[in-house]
Every structure is written in structure tokens, then in C-alpha cells.
Image (cartoon, rainbow, N blue to C red):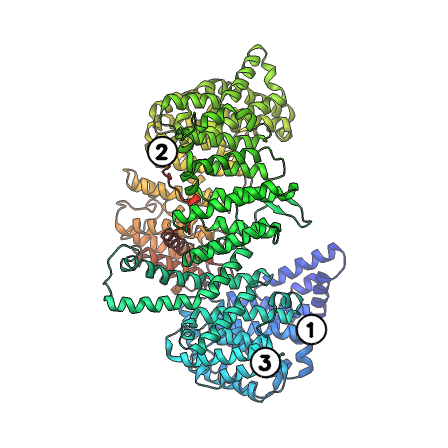
């Protein structure tokens, strides 16, 4: 009854009843009461007339939660329906909200007690302003400023409103408003800023009220980044701010304002003011925080305010230097102040706080990178005469070059002191690289790392880059500092796990930055000292830490190892030693490092070296059983992959085959033994231990196949047919278990184990075929025998027993053997298509692996065997198109992207085929409708780039006249459209008008016409769609970075090219070269 009374909005709502409902929702009553209240409140919120009750509710209720509920209703209307409301309703609401704000903030007591409510009202007012101002509320700023002068509390609240407005327009507008709207608001704020500026200065000069001064400083902070510069430098504003800086109550807010001023970028017109500001600031700072202070200690013991001060100080220095460091390099007095500031910043960098360190590190990276670029041009004028694209630039006259050189040298000299201290900072605080698996836990124990910390990896990347620049600036100082620190580890003066770790991570990170001779000399000393340290240090944990560091360092320097066989052999033998060390993580790291080194130095192991009787690989194969005796199965697989990589480097086919035979002798003997037993009694294969052994043998084979590729053929040929027989038998066992035990049987450990063998079989075949060179005879040997045991088995099985790897295996085969597979496509279709679709189209969750692999298979068929798709019946083709639409509707990003890529592939193939008109007549409108649906529903933003490409393709087809027949159904629509373009235009306008009732017909028509005008310019087409999405209001107040993903990807590629041009920036171990090591 009460609920019906609330739902009846034809008369003023019963506010006490609404209060009771809201209280029930937030209260501690029964679950049923809360659910009922939630239901009623949702219904009210969704009722389009509910907002008309907002004024009545706000006037009558005293309950804060009820007020917030009413304001939430109002916020929805402002966001989505405001412009569609009659003018008198808009003005009424606008005036009401303004009056309530003035009334509450005009009185000290109500302003303090109702603060939360006032803040929410301020937000609502700013949301209204985004629609009304400047066009329909021209005098808003003058009204606000004159209201502010009537009382200090109103003034304080006006400051809050101005701050919110600035943030909405300048900070949060991207992706929420159209480009034109943002531009209009910015121009209005700029043109009316004089009144706001006068108000702020007036408050700061006459008010004694702490809260008001703090609110004014806070508002200024929001405005300083965009206001015309004259208001800052040609008024008393800067002096006023510097006057407030020493006062503890305003110190942090003032520092934030000064930081904002420091970050402004323009030409050198105000340089003198900046120098003056910096010098006054430095004098004041020395009084507040003497240069001798131990800043990390002060930070650790300081209050929240004091810690915030150090954080703000780091921001001030880093932003000031980013933009204005050059103007401080001019006179001796300024240089002294600059060096003092850098000293402060280096001390702040030692503070044990991740955020503070990130701020400092970000700046050090920029400064050092800039110094390095100058240094590079000094060392190599030819490099600067030819820019990165390789085109010649006009050469500078020689005299001018000398002048530039001496300037650059002086600058390098000026920073040499701070840079040396910075090297020590980087070495002491180096972050952990990804390859290191051994860490110290919170109890001080050395353990294997269980989870990667992505923040640490990002930090390592920046620190590594910074240290490489520092190394280039002065290789000798870098080397000296590292060796000095290492010798302190040797003599025990500075020995701790952390000190050794950060030092070795730093040593590993500068790989490739030194010239070869210096790197060789440096590394000989480092490796010798580390091996020595490992010998003399006692304690299992200590040895594990040193072992981890030795492995990390040697893994980073393949160039050195290739040039020094004795060191390489010593290091590899040391790794074999570590493979017997059972401390958690040591064996894993030894196997990973071995693989990494072998991949970069493989030739060294197969060529007989001076003083050796046989190649190392032969010696290794002789002792293989002993070396791997203590390793776990997954470590043995890595080891086998490494040896496979060595064998792959052998050019003599006979030797290669002999090495392969020796490598595989243990697993192959075991395999023969099992198959022999099975021939006598097939039940032998059902034993769980036997199944595990079979799995292990297959995994070992896969590891070697992945590194040997084509050369694995003799080995896989030996086991292939037996392997298919085991596959078939295990498949029958699985089906039988599921048939007898129902769906739960597939979850039993026995069935899971059997399925692991099936998957590994498929993975082995796929790995081999993928890595093998494209030799048709290999395809002929391996594909036909798999048709029934693998494809037929997939079709016959119950859904829970079908392996998704079958789909990826055949996708690999089609991608590899391309058009030669056309004849087999009907068999593949018959076996997998219908039955897989039934599995994956019931919902969006079941069988996630099958989904992705199914669409990858379809894409392979569409790309390489398109004629086979044309031969499908129209019913089967409809199945294909439905499944593609179904894929890009998926909220799982990978599946949606695979579906969209497949759709683009299909569109381009059909466009060029004789069935072009027929295809587009059947599917054009469906595809357009479905693409607009996912483009505008906010769940599929990552697919934005591909959605745009599909729409561009469709509109081009309609516009270009490539389609020679009507795409509309002439039987049901007899209107004679002059062209397909005219029909598509009308269809799209109708489609979008229905989907977005909040947009006017003129707006929709303008958007659709814009699409047709920009079909040939992808960039304009994309921007046009972005603006429409924001205008449609569906995308406001959301994270819209995915709409800009393509631009971000282009930026990443430019950055990679830059890094490749600087020695060491991309670690030698990561370079995808063959690293000639003959």
C-alpha cells in the first residue's frame, strides 16, 4: 500500500514515507525490508516524472540520505535530458539550486553542519552550468563574484564552485563533451577571469579567516594551469603566494600553487620573474628545511602534513626543472641555487616512499636523457648532421660547432657532480628485474617469487634506461662506483642481501652500453668477484642470493660470453652446479638462464673450441643423466629445449641427427618400453603412473620440437603413429568415463590426466608443424593420418570431452599449408563447425578456449581457403556470418577482436568476388545494425578501431557505386531510391533516431551526412564517430581511453625505434637477432 502511494507521482510525494523507505534501505532492518526498499527506490529513480518532485523533497526532508537520493534523480535528468526540458522548468530548477546554496552557505552554522549536502549541490550546479553557461546564463560569473563579497562563508563556497567548474572544463572534459563545447567553455572562463582574479587577490590580502584563505589557495591551484599569464606575472599574485609559503597552515597549498606556476610552458618572456621566484623560494626553503637535514629520516618520522610537504617539494623541483632549468644555468649565483635544489632532490629521492620516488625518478630520467642527447651530439657530430630518418640536414659552420661544443662541455661539467651522486642513487635503489625469481619475504626468508609485481617492473624499466644514459655520460665513473661497491661486499663492510641485489641488478641493466673492450674488462672483474664471493660465503640463504645474482648478471651479457669461451664454459658448468641446489627458485633460475645463454651463444657449443677434445654439446650429452638428476619435470623440459637449441646450430646433418638421437635416448627408450608393454596388454596404458610418464615424454618432445623445428622430423616420425593410437585409446576411455559417470566425470583427476595427454599430443604436432619449414611433403606425411583419429574423434565426442587444441591445430595447418588445404575444408567443416557452434552459442561463458580457437580457425579458412567458403550452402554461410556477429558481440576482448578481424577479412574477400552484390544484399544492413549496437553500448570500447574500419568499409561500398544492384529488398520496399547511398543514409538516420531518443533529428542527420563526407579520410571518419559517441551521452562520465588506443600504439612504436638507436637501451638479451657467434 505504502509502495503504491509512493509510486503515484500525480500529486506531491509523501516525504515522511520516502524518508522511511530510504531509512529502510540504509538501515539495519531485515534483508527483505532492504530488498523491498531498494525495489521501490529503483522504480522511482527510473520514473521519468520523478525529477519534478525533487524541489518538494529537498524543501520538506531533513534526512541527508533522502536529499542525496533526490539529487541523484536530478543528476540523471541533467546528464541525459536537460536540453529537452521546457525553458521555464530549466530556469526554475537552476534558480532553486542557486537559492538553496546561497541560503545554506550564508550562515556559518548551517554551512559547517550541512557541508556534505552543500558539496553535492555545488556538483549539481556545475553539471547544470555545463549545459546553460555561457549561452543561456551569461551573467553567472559576475553574479557569483558579487555574491561572494556579501559574506566570508558564501565566498568560501563560491571558491569551491569555481574550483569544480575549472576541473570539469579543463581536467575531466575529454571524452565527456564534444570538442566544440569544451572550446566554448574554455573561452568563457578565460574571458571572465578578471573578476575571479580580483576576488582571489582581495581575499588573500584582507581576510584573516584560515578556512577561506585555504579555499582560495585551493581554487587558485585549479585555475593557475590555464589562466592568461599576465594575471600571474603582472599582478601581485606571485609575491602574495611567496608571502604565504613560510606559514605552516598554508605551506602545502601555496607550494602546490607555486608548482602549478613552475610547470607553465611558453617562450622566455617571463624568465626574469621565474629566476626571482626560484631564488626567493630557495632562501625560504633553507629556513624551513635546512640543507643538512636527513630527509629520508625526517620523512619516516614526520606527520602527514610534513610528509605531504616533502612530496609537494619533489613535485615543485621536478616540474620547475623540466621547464626552466636552462634559465638557472646562466649566472654563478643561479647555478649555486640550482645545484642546491638538485642536492635537495637527490636527498628526497632516497625517501622510502614509492610515490615520491616515482616523481623523482621520472624527472631524473628526463634530465639524464636530455644531457645524453647533447653528449651524443658532442661525441658524434655526424650523428646529429644526419637525423634519425637518415635525411641530410644543412651542416652548421665549423666555428659555430666549436662554440656549441664548448657550451655543451661546460654544461656537462656543471652537472658532473649531481650525475655522479645520481649514479649511486640508481645503484642503491635499483628495482628488481623480471628474470630474478628469488626474493626476500616479509619474514626475512629467501623464497621463490610467486607473483610478478608489475609496478616494480615498470620502475625497473625506467631506472634501467636512466642508468644506461648515466653510463654513456661517464663510463669510468659508472664502472668505478659499481666495482667499489662490489669490493665492499667482498670484505664484508657493506654486505647485505639488498645491497648485493641492487648492485647486481644495476650491473646487469647496463649491458650493451659500454664499448666491448671496457665491458670485457669490467665483467671479468665482476664475475670473478661474484664467483669468489659464492665460494667464501657460508649459509644456504646467502648462497642462494649470490647464485641468483651471478645468474642474472651472466644472462645479461651474451656478447661477453660469446667472446670468451672459457668464461662461457665456467658459467655453464656453474649453472649445472646450481641445478643440483634444492633451494627454492635456484634450479628454476639456473634452467631459465641456461636457455637464455644457449639461445644467444648456440654456435659456441657445437664448434670444437681450442683446447677441447670434442664440441661442448657432445660432452654435455654424455653427462646428461647426471646433470638433470635433481631437476623437476618442468625444469627438465626447459633443459631439453636449451640442448635442442644447441643442436639446431649444428650445420652437419649427420652430426645433428646423432646429437638428437643421443638427446632423446632416455625419453625414447621409455616410450618404446611403454608401447611394448601395451602391445601385450593394452590395460597397461590405463595405469595413472604410466599416463603421467607418457605425458612427461610428450612434453619433453614438445620442448625439443619448439627449438629444433624441421630438424625434429626424424624423432617425431618414430613416435607419430603410436602416438595417434594412444590418443584414440585415451579418447575412448574419456568418452566411456563421461558416458558412465555423467558430466562430473570430466572433473575427476583420472579424466583430467587422460585429457592432458591428448592436449599434449595435439600441442606437440602443432608445435612441430608450426616451426617446421614449409615443406609440402611434411604436410602430406602428417595431415592425412590425423583426419580420423583427431577430427573424427572431435565430432564423435561429447562436448565436455572435445579438445579446443584440435581447432588451433587445424588453424595452424591451414595457415601453414594455405590453399593446398582447400579440398580438406569440407571435412574440417563437417567435423567441427556445427558441433562447436552448439557448444559456444548457448551463452557467453561456457568453453572459453573453444570460442577463441574456433574463430581463429574460421579466420584461417577465410584468409587462405576462401573458395571453400563460397562453396558452402546459403544456410551454412548464414551460420558462419551469425557466428561472426555473435563473436564481436562478445564482451571478452580477444574473442570480439578475432570476430571483427574475421569480419573485415570476409568483407574484403566478398568485395572482390563475383558474389559481391548477393552477399551485401543479404548481410549489409544486419552488419551495420550490429556494429552500431556494439559501438554505442559502452561494453565494447576496445574494439573501437575495428568498428570504425567495418563502418568505413560499408559506407565506402554504398557510396562508391561498387554494388551494382539494390541492397534493399525490392519486394517489400517499393520506394525507388536513387542509389544505395541514399537508402543507407535514410536507414542509418532511422536506426540512430530510434536508438537515441535524446538526440534531435537534426543532430542525427548531421552525423550521418558527416559519415558519408568523410568515408575516404579514416582519421576524420574516426573523430566524427568519437564526437557522436560523446554527444549521444552514453559515454559521458566513463573511462574513454580505449577510443584513443590506436594513437597510443603508434606512439609506442616510435618510442621503440628511438630506443633501438641508443646502445644498451634495449637489452642485448632481448634483441631478436641471430647474434652471429661463429
* Quarter of the figure with the C terminus: top left
Give left or right: position of 41 versus 318. right
- The CA distance from mark 2 to mark 1 is 67 Å
The answer to whether the residues at label 1 and label 3 have Cβ atoms under 8 Å apart is no
Residue 262: image x %, image y %?
47, 74
- The CA distance from mark 1 to mark 3 is 46 Å
Say above or below: 342 vs 140.
Answer: above
Q: Quadrant of residue 73?
A: bottom right
Q: Residues within 10 Å of mark 3 (few under 14, many from 20)?
A: some
Q: Quadrant of residue 599?
A: top left
Q: What is the secondary structure assignment of the residue under circle 2?
A: helix
Residue 946: image x %, image y %?
40, 49
Name the residue furthest top. 680
Residue 822: image x %, image y %?
34, 28
Q: Of the residues tagged 1 and 3, which is closer to the observer?
A: 3
- The CA distance from mark 2 to mark 3 is 77 Å
Q: Quadrant of residue 68?
A: bottom right
The residue where tag 1 is placed is: 61
Report the label total: 3
Would residue 52 be visible to someone looking at this image? no
The residue where tag 2 is placed is: 869
Residue 246's label in the rendered image is 3
Residue depicted at 30% across the width and 48% down the height: 957
Residue 857: image x %, image y %?
42, 34
Q: Residues within 10 Å of mark 2 (few under 14, many from 20)?
A: some
Looking at the image, which is closer to me, 976 or 246? Answer: 246
Q: Residues within 10 Å of mark 1 (few under 14, many from 20)?
A: some
Dot 2 or dot 3, earlier in sequence? 3
Dot 1 or dot 3, earlier in sequence? 1
Residue depicted at 49% across the width and 17% down the height: 722
Would residue 24 be visible to someone looking at this image? yes
* Quarter of the figure with the N terminus: bottom right
Amino acid at each position: 500500500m505504502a509502495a503504491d502511494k509512493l509510486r503515484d507521482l500525480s500529486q506531491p510525494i509523501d516525504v515522511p514515507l520516502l524518508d522511511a523507505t530510504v531509512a529502510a534501505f540504509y538501515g539495519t532492518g531485515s534483508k527483505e525490508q532492504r530488498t523491498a526498499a531498494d525495489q521501490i527506490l529503483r522504480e522511482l529513480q527510473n520514473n521519468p516524472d520523478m525529477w519534478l518532485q525533487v524541489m518538494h523533497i529537498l524543501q520538506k526532508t531533513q534526512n541527508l540520505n533522502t536529499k542525496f537520493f533526490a539529487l541523484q534523480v536530478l543528476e540523471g535528468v541533467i546528464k541525459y535530458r536537460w536540453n529537452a526540458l521546457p525553458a521555464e522548468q530549466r530556469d526554475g530548477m537552476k534558480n532553486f539550486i542557486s537559492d538553496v546554496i546561497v541560503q545554506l552557505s550564508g550562515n556559518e552554522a548551517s554551512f559547517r553542519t550541512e557541508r556534505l549536502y552543500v558539496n553535492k549541490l555545488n556538483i549539481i550546479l556545475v553539471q547544470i552550468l555545463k549545459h546553460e553557461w555561457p549561452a543561456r546564463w551569461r551573467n553567472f560569473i559576475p553574479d557569483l563574484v558579487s555574491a561572494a563579497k556579501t559574506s566570508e562563508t558564501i565566498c568560501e563556497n563560491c571558491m569551491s564552485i569555481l574550483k569544480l567548474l575549472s576541473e570539469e572544463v579543463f581536467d575531466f572534459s575529454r571524452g565527456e563533451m564534444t570538442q566544440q563545447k569544451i572550446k566554448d567553455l574554455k573561452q568563457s572562463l578565460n574571458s571572465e577571469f578578471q573578476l575571479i582574479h580580483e576576488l582571489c587577490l582581495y581575499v588573500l590580502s584582507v581576510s584573516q579567516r584560515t578556512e577561506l584563505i585555504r579555499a582560495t589557495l585551493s581554487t587558485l591551484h585549479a585555475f593557475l594551469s590555464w589562466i592568461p599569464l599576465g594575471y600571474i606575472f603582472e599582478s601581485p599574485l606571485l609575491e602574495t603566494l611567496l608571502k604565504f609559503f613560510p606559514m605552516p597552515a598554508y605551506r602545502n597549498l601555496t607550494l602546490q600553487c607555486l608548482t602549478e606556476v613552475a610547470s607553465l610552458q611558453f617562450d622566455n618572456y617571463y624568465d626574469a620573474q621565474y629566476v626571482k621566484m626560484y631564488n626567493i623560494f630557495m632562501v625560504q626553503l633553507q629556513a624551513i628545511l635546512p640543507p643538512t637535514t636527513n630527509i629520508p629520516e625526517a620523512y619516516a618520522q614526520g606527520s602527514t602534513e610534513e610528509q605531504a610537504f616533502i612530496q609537494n617539494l619533489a613535485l615543485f623541483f621536478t616540474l620547475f626543472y623540466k621547464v626552466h632549468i636552462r634559465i638557472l644555468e646562466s649566472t654563478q649565483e643561479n647555478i649555486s641555487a640550482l645545484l642546491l635544489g638538485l642536492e635537495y632532490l637527490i636527498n628526497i629521492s632516497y625517501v622510502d616512499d614509492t610515490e615520491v620516488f616515482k616523481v623523482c625518478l621520472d624527472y631524473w630520467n628526463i634530465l639524464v636523457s636530455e644531457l645524453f642527447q647533447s653528449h651524443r651530439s658532442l661525441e658524434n657530430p655526424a650523428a646529429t648532421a644526419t637525423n634519425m630518418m637518415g635525411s641530410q640536414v644543412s651542416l652548421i659552420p665549423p666555428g659555430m660547432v666549436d662554440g656549441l661544443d664548448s657550451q655543451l662541455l661546460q654544461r656537462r661539467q656543471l652537472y658532473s657532480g649531481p650525475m655522479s651522486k645520481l649514479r649511486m642513487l640508481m645503484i642503491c635503489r635499483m628495482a628488481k628485474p623480471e628474470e630474478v625469481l628469488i626474493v626476500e619475504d616479509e619474514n626475512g626468508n629467501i623464497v621463490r617469487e610467486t607473483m610478478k609485481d608489475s609496478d616494480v617492473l615498470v620502475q625497473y624499466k625506467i631506472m634501467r634506461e636512466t642508468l644506461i644514459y648515466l653510463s654513456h655520460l661517464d663510463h669510468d665513473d659508472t664502472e668505478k662506483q659499481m666495482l667499489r661497491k662490489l669490493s665492499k661486499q667482498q670484505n664484508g663492510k657493506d654486505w647485505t642481501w639488498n645491497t648485493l641485489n641492487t648492485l647486481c641488478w644495476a650491473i646487469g641493466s647496463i649491458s650493451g652500453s659500454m664499448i666491448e673492450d671496457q665491458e670485457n674488462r669490467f665483467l671479468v672483474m665482476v664475475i670473478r668477484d661474484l664467483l669468489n664471493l659464492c665460494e667464501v660465503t657460508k649459509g644456504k640463504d646467502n648462497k642462494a642470493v649470490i647464485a641468483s645474482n651471478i645468474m642474472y648478471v651472466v644472462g645479461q651479457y651474451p656478447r661477453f660470453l660469446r667472446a670468451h669461451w672459457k668464461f662461457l664454459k665456467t658459467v655453464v658448468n656453474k649453472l649445472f652446479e646450481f641445478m643440483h641446489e634444492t633451494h627454492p627458485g635456484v634450479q628454476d633460475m639456473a634452467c631459465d638462464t641456461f636457455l637464455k645463454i644457449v639461445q644467444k651463444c648456440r654456435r659456441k657449443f657445437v664448434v670444437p673450441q681450442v683446447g677441447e677434445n670434442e664440441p661442448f654439446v657432445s660432452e654435455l650429452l654424455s653427462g646428461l643423466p647426471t646433470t638433470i638428476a635433481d631437476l623437476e619435470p618442468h625444469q627438465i623440459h626447459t633443459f631439453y629445449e636449451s640442448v635442442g637449441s644447441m643442436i639446431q646450430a649444428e650445420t652437419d646433418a649427420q652430426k645433428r641427427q646423432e646429437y638428437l638421437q643421443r638427446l632423446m635416448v632416455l625419453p625414447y627408450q621409455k616410450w618404446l618400453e611403454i608401447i611394448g608393454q601395451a602391445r601385450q596388454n593394452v590395460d597397461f596404458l590405463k595405469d595413472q603412473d604410466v599416463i603421467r610418464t607418457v605425458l612427461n615424454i610428450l612434453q619433453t618432445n614438445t620442448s625439443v620440437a619448439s627449438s629444433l623445428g624441421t630438424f625434429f622430423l626424424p624423432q617425431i616420425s618414430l613416435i607419430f603413429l603410436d602416438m595417434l593410437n594412444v590418443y584414440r585409446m585415451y579418447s575412448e576411455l574419456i568418452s566411456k568415463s563421461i558416458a558412465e559417470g555423467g558430466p562430473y566425470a570430466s572433473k575427476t583427476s583420472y579424466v583430467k590426466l587422460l585429457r592432458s595427454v591428448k592436449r599434449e599430443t595435439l600441442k606437440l604436432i602443432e608445435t612441430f608443424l608450426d616451426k617446421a619449414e614449409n615443406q609440402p611433403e611434411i604436410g602430406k606425411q602428417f595431415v592425412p593420418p590425423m583426419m580420423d583419429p583427431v577430427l573424427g574423434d572431435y565430432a564423435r565426442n561429447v562436448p565436455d570431452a572435445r579438445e579446443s587444441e584440435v581447432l588451433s591445430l587445424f588453424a595452424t595447418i591451414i595457415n601453414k599449408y594455405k590453399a593446398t588445404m582447400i579440398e580438406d575444408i569440407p571435412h574440417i567443416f563437417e567435423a567441427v563447425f556445427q558441433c562447436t557452434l552448439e557448444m559456444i552459442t548457448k551463452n557467453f561463458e561456457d568453453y572459453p578456449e573453444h570460442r577463441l580457437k574456433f574463430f581463429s580457425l574460421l579466420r584461417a579458412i577465410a584468409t587462405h581457403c576462401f573458395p571453400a567458403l563460397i562453396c558452402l550452402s546459403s544456410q551454412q554461410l548464414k551460420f558462419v556470418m551469425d557466428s561472426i556477429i555473435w563473436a564481436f558481440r562478445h564482451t571478452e576482448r580477444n574473442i570480439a577482436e578475432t570476430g571483427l578481424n574475421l569480419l573485415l577479412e570476409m568483407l574484403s574477400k566478398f568485395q572482390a568476388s563475383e558474389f559481391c552484390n548477393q552477399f551485401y544484399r543479404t548481410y549489409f544492413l544486419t552488419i551495420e545494425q550490429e556494429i552500431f549496437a556494439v559501438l554505442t553500448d559502452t561494453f565494447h570500447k576496445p574494439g573501437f578501431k575495428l568498428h570504425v574500419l567495418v563502418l568505413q568499409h560499408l559506407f565506402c561500398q554504398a557510396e562508391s557505386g561498387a554494388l551494382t544492384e539494390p541492397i534493399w529488398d525490392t519486394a517489400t520496399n517499393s520506394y525507388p531510391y536513387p542509389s544505395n547511398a541514399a537508402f543507407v543514409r535514410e536507414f542509418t538516420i532511422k536506426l540512430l533516431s530510434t536508438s537515441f531518443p535524446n538526440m534531435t533529428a537534426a543532430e542525427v542527420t548531421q552525423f550521418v551526412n558527416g559519415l558519408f563526407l568523410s568515408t575516404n579520410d579514416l582519421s576524420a571518419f574516426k573523430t566524427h564517430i568519437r564526437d557522436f559517441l560523446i554527444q549521444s551521452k552514453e559515454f559521458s562520465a566513463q573511462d574513454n581511453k580505449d577510443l584513443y588506443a590506436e594513437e597510443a600504439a603508434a606512439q609506442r612504436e616510435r618510442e621503440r625505434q628511438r630506443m633501438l638507436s641508443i646502445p644498451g637501451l634495449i637489452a642485448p638479451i632481448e634483441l631478436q637477432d641471430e647474434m652471429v657467434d661463429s
